[in-house]
Amino acid sequence: MHKRILVLIDGSPASKRSLDEAIDIARTARGLLRLVHVVDDLSLARRSTDTDTWLGTLHNWGREILEAAKKAAEARGVHADVMLYSDFATPLADAVAYEARMWPADLIVLSTPGRCGRWAMGSDAERFLRTSTVPVMLVPEPVEETVDKRSSTRQQAALAPALAFE
C-alpha cells in the first residue's frame, strides 16, 4: 500500500482532482501526503505583477495554494505537509524527483493535462513517467472538460488559486 504520497499542486482544477485522488488513497492506506508546489517560468506567466515584487508574489501565491490544499486534506482526515520551491532556479521535474527521493515517496500523483494545459511528449508528466524510481499515478481530466475548458483552466487557476481547493 502507498503510505507516503507526493502530490504536485499548482492551484488548477486538474491539480485539485489529483489532490482528491491522493487523499482517497491516503485515507484508505492511512498514509501521509507531501504537497509540492514549484515556482518557475510557468508560474510567472500565469501571474502578472509589478516586476519589483513578482518573486515575493509568486512565493506567497505558492504558499496560499499549498495551505489551501493542506486544509482540504486535513478536513478529510489526512495529514499533509507542504514543500515550496520558490528559488525560481529548480526545474519542476528536478524538484519533484528530489522530493520523491528525500522524503521518500511511495507514489507520485500528477494531473494531466499539466500546467501547460496539454499532454505531450516532452511534458513534465511524461518525463516523470520515464525517469521516476517510484510509481507515478496520472489523474486525467474528464473528457468533457478537456475539450471545452482547456484555456479557461489556466485562467481560473490564475484568478483564484487559493479557492481552488475549497
Image (cartoon, rainbow, N blue to C red):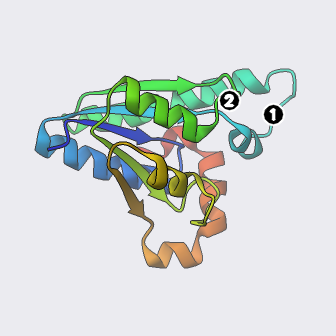
Camera-side residue of 69 and 128: 128
State which tag comes first along the sequence, 1 or 2.
1
At 66% from the left and 55% from the top, the residue drawn is 155
Label 1 close to label 2 by CB (< 8 Å): yes
Q: Quadrant of the C terminus?
A: top left
Residue at image position (65%, 47%) is 159
- Outermost residue, right side: 51
Where residue 83 appears, as percent x and y from the top left, is: 46, 25
- Between 153 and 27, the one nearer to me in the picture: 27
Q: Is residue 65 visible?
A: no
Tell me the element at label 2: helix
The quadrant where residue 81 appears: top left
In this figure, which residue is indicated by the disc labeled 1?
Answer: 49
Position in image of residue 80 (x %, y %):
31, 28
C-alpha gap between disc 1 and disc 2: 9 Å
Q: Which picture quadrant has residue 56? A: top right
